[in-house]
Every structure is written in structure tokens, then in C-alpha cells.
Image (spheres, helix red, strand yellow):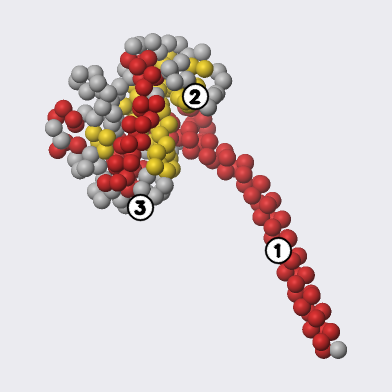
Amino acid sequence: MSEAIDKNSKKNAILFALLLSVICSFLITIAASGLKEFQTANMELDKKINILKAADLIGAKKPSKKKINELYDAHIKEVTVDARGKIIKIQTAKSLNLYFYTADDMIKGYILPINTRGLWGKIQGYLAFENDGQTVSGFSVFSHSETPGLGGEIESAWFQKNFKGKKILNSHNKFVSIKIAKGKASNLPKDKQAHYVDGISGATLTGRYLSEGIKNTLVKYDAVSVTFRQKKLKARKVK
């Protein structure tokens, strides 16, 4: 009889464990489904914040959600362009995402998404330009896996502010990109200082990867920059 009781106890324990697993799985699924919409909304808001930061439309102090949405709707227009920099309505495998930032319905500049490798993972952010097609107006990072206190400093305000005013063309109007210096940009020859930002101590590889990623992105979007330099979009009204 004791053997029968033991068998029943084991069966009950197994059934209880299975039932508990099913209930937990069910609750986790419900929680995940309920949070998905919330997470998606937060990701969209974070994207808007970083685009606005890159365009220098908000400062270090985070505005309210309502203000962020108002600024974004008033000043940012998302478009898709082809390899020639021409705005297209239908996305293709080779099309590129682009953001115009505007004022009084006129294009004042543009913003490029940055997606490059870092030391430990992807670095994602935005690089904004004035409507001259060569002067950086801002930079922001919204996702990275770099080491806190070292490469992780790429998300710091002091580092990102260094990009403002840097140029992707040299004095001979040749493309040179924007690079991260090993140390202070002011220690470089004067003719290079306009194309370098201050590096981060102890994060040489992060700087190298970010420099490579920025250059690769600028090459892909070169037709857009050329279009602005030729003033074909500079004074164009946004439809």
C-alpha cells in the first residue's frame, strides 16, 4: 500500500509541476503581449529623441513626451532615397532611410542613421548635417554595447558635442569623412582638425570602428550630400 501511495505522490508531483509550468508560460505570454505595445512605443519615442538631439533641436534635458512628439512632427520628415539621392515613394532592397529637419516648411538639413560595429556589438545613432551638405550639426548614439567608462563614453554629451561644426570635405573640396582622433583633435595638424573629434582615452578600437562606420555611411549617402552641396534641396519646400 505504501508503494501505491508513493506512486500517487510522484504522479501528483509531476502533474503539479506540469500544471505550474503551463500556468507560468501562459502568464509570461500574456505579460509579453501586454508589454509589446508599450516597448514599441518607447522605442519609437527614443528614436525621435535621438533624431531631435542630432538635429540640435533639444538639449541635454529631456522634454515631455508631448513636447517631443510636437517637435518631431513639426521639424522632422522621414523620406526614402535611392542610390542617386532621389526621393522615392516605394522602398526597395537598395533604398536608404533619410530624415530632413525643417523650419517654416523649408529643408534646413538632413540626418543619416549610423549602424556600425563596435568593440562588443553594434553602435547605432544619427549624424546630422547642415544644408550645405558638408557641415555636421549634431551626433547622437541610442544603442551600443561598449565598455562603460571607456568606449561607452560615445553616448556622453561631451563626446557627441565634439561633432558639431566638423566638415566632411577638406579645403580642396575632397571627401575626407569625420574621424575619431587618438587623443585631442587639437594636437593634429591644423588642416586635419576640422575633420576629427576628440578621442576617448582607453577606447582606441571603439573610435576606429565608429570612424569606419561613419565613413561607410557617408559613402552610401554621398549622392544626398552632393545634392545639398549643389543647392538642389537647400531651399526646397517640404511637401
Residue drawn at point x = 52 percent, y = 32 percent: 66
Left or right of 132: which side holds 181? left
Label pair 2/1, CB-CB below 8 angstroms: no
Between the C-alphas of marks 3 and 1, the distance is: 37 Å
For marks 3 and 2 on the same chain, the one whose residue lies earlier in the sequence:
2
Residue 142, position as x, y percentages in the image: 43, 40
Q: Secondary structure at mark 2?
A: loop
Local crowd size for mark 2, using a 10 Å CA cut-off: few (<14), some (14–19), many (≥20): some
Q: Which residue is mark 2?
A: 95
Task: Judge whether 93 appears above or below 162 on screen.
Answer: above
Q: Amino acid at mark 3?
A: Pro
Residue drawn at point x = 19 percent, y = 40 percent: 184
Residue 74 visible, this orientation? no
Residue 165, position as x, y percentages in the image: 27, 27
> Looking at the image, which residue sits at the far bottom?
1
Between the C-alphas of marks 2 and 1, the distance is: 46 Å
Q: Which residue is mark 3?
A: 148
- Which of the 4 quarters of the picture holds residue 127? top left
Local crowd size for mark 1, using a 10 Å CA cut-off: few (<14), some (14–19), many (≥20): few
Q: Amino acid at mark 1?
A: Ser
Q: Secondary structure at mark 1?
A: helix
Q: Which residue is mark 1?
A: 21
Residue 97, position as x, y percentages in the image: 48, 26
Quadrant housing the N terminus: bottom right
Q: Amino acid at mark 2?
A: Ser
Task: Judge whether 44 appears above or below 25 on screen.
Answer: above
For marks 2 and 1 on the same chain, the one whose residue lies earlier in the sequence:
1
Local crowd size for mark 3, using a 10 Å CA cut-off: few (<14), some (14–19), many (≥20): few
> Looking at the image, which residue sits at the far right?
1
Give whichever of 30, 63 is nearer the camera.
30
Left or right of 123: which side holds 203? left
Q: How many marks?
A: 3
